[in-house]
Amino acid sequence: MEKQAFQKVYAKITNITKATVQLKAQGVGYDEIAMVHGRLGQVVKIIGENVTLQVFSGTEGIPTNAEVIFLGHPPRLKVSDQLAGRFFNAYGEPIDGGPEVEGEIRDIGSPSVNPVRRKQPSQLIATGIAGIDLNNSLVTGQKIPFFADPDQPYNQVMANVALRAEADKIILGGMGLSNDDYLYFKNVFDNAGALDRIISFVNTTENPPVERLLVPDMALTAAEYFAVDHNEKVLVLLTDMTLFADALSIVSNRMDQIPSKDSMPGSLYSDLARIYEKAVQFPAGGSITIIAVTTLSGGDITHAIPDNTGYITEGQLFLRRDTDIGKVIVDPFRSLSRLKQLVIGKQTREDHPQVMNAAVRLYADAANAKTKMENGFDLTDYDERTMKFAKEYSDKLLAIDVNVDTEEMLNITWELFQKYFTKAEVGIKQEFMDKYWKKEE
Amino acid sequence: MDKNKKTTGKVAGIIANLVIIDVDGPVAQNEICFIKHQETDLMAEVIKVLGNHAYVQVFESTRGLKIGTEAHFEGHMLEVTLGPGILSRNYDGLQNDLDKMEGIFLKRGDYTDPLDREKLWDFKPLAKAGDKVHAGDWLGEVDENTMPHKIMVPFKFEGAYTVKSVVPEGQYKVDDEIAVLTDSKGKDISVTMVQKWPVKVAIRAYKEKPRPFKPLETGVRVIDTLNPIAEGGTGFIPGPFGTGKTVLQHAISKQAEADVVVIAACGERANEVVEIFTEFPELDDPRTGRKLMERTTIIANTSNMPVAAREASVYTAMTIGEYYRSMGLRVLLMADSTSRWAQALREMSNRLEELPGQDAFPMDLSAIISNFYSRAGYVFLNNGATGSITFIGTVSPAGGNLKEPVTESTRKAARCFYGLSQARADSKRYPAIDPIDSYSKYLEYPEMQKYYEENVSENWLDGVITAKDILLRGKEAQEQINILGDDGVPIDFHERFWNSELIDFVILQQDAFDNIDCSTPMERQEYMLAKVLNVTKMKFDFKHFVDVQNFFKNIINVFKQMNYSEFQSDDFKKYEKELEKLLAEHVVEEVS
């Protein structure tokens, strides 16, 4: 951390809690950062002369006579093209052994975009994963989380999405990432030769939890630099936002705030919205798209974290293990991309919306048939056919290891329709039937 | 609040956007002050006073603010500026014109003028010298996007006044003097087209507020037919995320029979507001043939904008609504979502360290919500003209649980409940309004019943009640079928179930993205309901439950084609004939 001349040094801390210290000081600005016993802290409360600092890495071992230096500015990041390809910690300091980044200094947690200056998102992001591209297409400027159980391979799927998406920059914000996952991301990006367009801000499980509160703002400050200053398409990956929210609740608890639902702070919605709403399509062409991960406990989406997230984000993606094919698939029922209507059938082939709906409907019929079978009822011929269709549809399209383009996904779906069903059972608009249904009836 | 000297103070404490100010003079609860941070003024509102400490909530980020910073108190509460030119504007929660702000990002302390001070308006006088007038009485009118915008005696004027002069017909700017009034003491007061009003106080410049007595057509069948909202009525739409709250709200604001639409996007997604910004200027208003945006005002305080201004945004929207109501116009006010407003209250109550109520919401949440809903209503103005504010708010219940405090408090205040059901949304039955749990208290109003008898038909209400009964019986039949199996119940259980499906598919479900089906006029709703109910009364010759399913699937398909066709067009009649044919194949006894 830089030191400046004439900074006043304080050496008398009056109160210490697990995460905060309090001292008497003058001329301190709200939100400004300070070095407390060599650790970074931020001003969270000022009452008269009493200033309360939240110490990100915890207060273990801080004595009452520790040196406190106020730096006179909020947390900052130096932005320039040198960010590309680098790995940083939550404070924006390099952790890859490389040199310090030179560039323009920017405060993190910048103001919101004026809503009238936004553009309606309209660019498809292709990932090659049919469970996403076919059924839940993503759009630039969108924000969408994976709702996943901790044992699901969400980080792998996200790494794939990141590499395949035609983004100019990919920014990884890792919060409470296990060291193994951190190395996984590093290897995958390295092996793909994509390191030059990737920037990572990582807080691992080895780092103090409160530090991770800085990660999204760091990642998004870098994202805004590339999207606004360079009109680039930026994809931001945030994993795991549940651990971010947990850190919020730790801080609010230490600040003696009254918890609301699920012991989360009452401001959880605003805190999460402030981050997710950074997703934006700018009129000049730059965009920030956020793909996040929210881990669930026992699949419970009514918990305050996924619940508030669901109200903020534009849809959600669910992963599920399909035991019939032994693979993980993108669940077509519970997943939803709210912005897909803006691109499907417009930037993708015209038959996309109808084919997507018909396939999901037939897949739902298969689920009903399966329930019937499990309850010991007789199956009709149609039931049998839907179940065969569902298995193949799951394997060839929904599985997360699929990598084909959207046109091919639609062709595969048409093939499956013709293999198992009659025209009437598929029930798609006549003009598309005429064009894509090749089989004689 | 007449004072010689403005109260000033110095910042003595900062906790996020709650700031404590040491004041040197009198301050009022809810008074506005500006904190001079470096070169920018940060606007704030007093929310608590303890001794000489005023606790204020700042409508902006307090980053960098220091102890000792000066603050100036304004001597008035949070006010909006009312005058011609509000329609078609995009404001933030404090009525700053968003389009006038420079740059991509919102800047702290960037307060812009809500009105255009240079534009010339065609003014026509309505009052003449010698007239006795009161607050809210019409002095003249200007043409605002073809809407007759009344220039009124400012609402703040108390008592009776005599018109001394009104300017002749001609072009004037909003700040030009358009009339001079004389008060009871003989003092002359100049009046322009602009006035200010504190948002948290209801405008009461009307004679009487009767019970709502006629429905407000929304074009949404499940509302208009089953659970109508009254003109001047209140309703709310609770629903878990992904059940189509916003699509439904947009549909209502596009189609409802209103002169002016005010949309408060309160703490919701910015991209949804962008959708309105993008679509409304393109969409035609079916009633005037002009663009929808011309009769719409948007108050956008999205979820990432300052929290304190979120609370103000719904009040700003309501006050603008009251202003247009006083002109004798029908205003539709939509707020999406009132839960975010309640959360803003919770955040502040928490910082004030107040004892919390349920889920940490403030104890007076229920009272605040009731008070807000009560500002809607149908009114008779002093000159006998009528105006109305119909208010529909959405609620985003935490965890989809309708027992949470915001939903419960709103239920006490609003007269219509449009519960969105996750199960209906999952099976793509849109709009996902639950037909059985939802209600409209207005159906019980004798005034409304009389209106239906006189203006729709004598047996309309009987039909509506029959339809509701069929839906309920269908649900019961379905439960039985699920337990006992298709074979395990008599055929009339299947008929009962499919009769309810018929109403569900033909009346309740509606395609918001289809140009014709999206909006159904009352006349057409009446025709279709009668047609559907007629089918439910017929007796058929089914031998097997599969016959029932196939038959109903077929007629539902034809009915849906009718819904997609222009009313009484050739296509419509073609499908109607096809329907008669299908019915004739199985009907054994027709009941008229």
Image (tube, coloured by chain):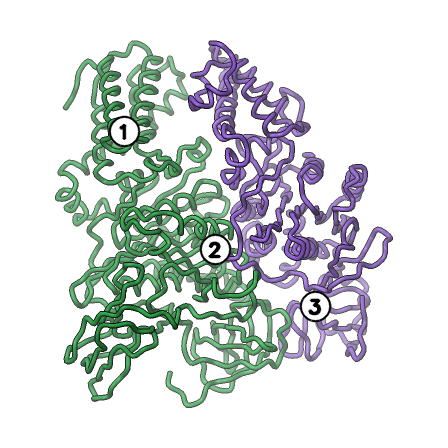
Chain colours: A purple, B green
State which tag comes first along the sequence, 2 or 1. 2
Which amino acid type is shown beneath numbered disc 2? Arg
Give the Cα distance between marks 2 and 3.
29 Å
Q: Are marks 2 and 1 in contact (CB under 8 Å)?
A: no
Q: Is residue B385 left or right of residue B41?
A: left
Query: Which chain is disc 2 placed on?
Result: B
Q: Is residue A228 left or right of residue B414?
A: right
| Element carrying mark 3 | strand
Residue under the image location 21 percent in, 78 percent down: B166
| Disc 1 target residue | B470
Q: Based on the displayed image, in which of its 4 quarters is residue A81 positioned?
A: bottom right
Badge 2: few (under 14), some or many (20 or more) residues near its Cα, within 10 Å? many
Q: Are marks 1 and 3 in contact (CB under 8 Å)?
A: no
Residue under the image location 37 percent in, 71 percent down: B198
- x, y percent for residue B52: 51, 83
| Element carrying mark 2 | helix
| Disc 2 target residue | B340
> Can the viewer see residue B432?
no
Residue under the image location 46 percent in, 19 percent down: A434
Give the Cα distance between marks 1 and 3.
64 Å
Badge 1: few (under 14), some or many (20 or more) residues near its Cα, within 10 Å? many
- The disc placed on residue A53 is 3
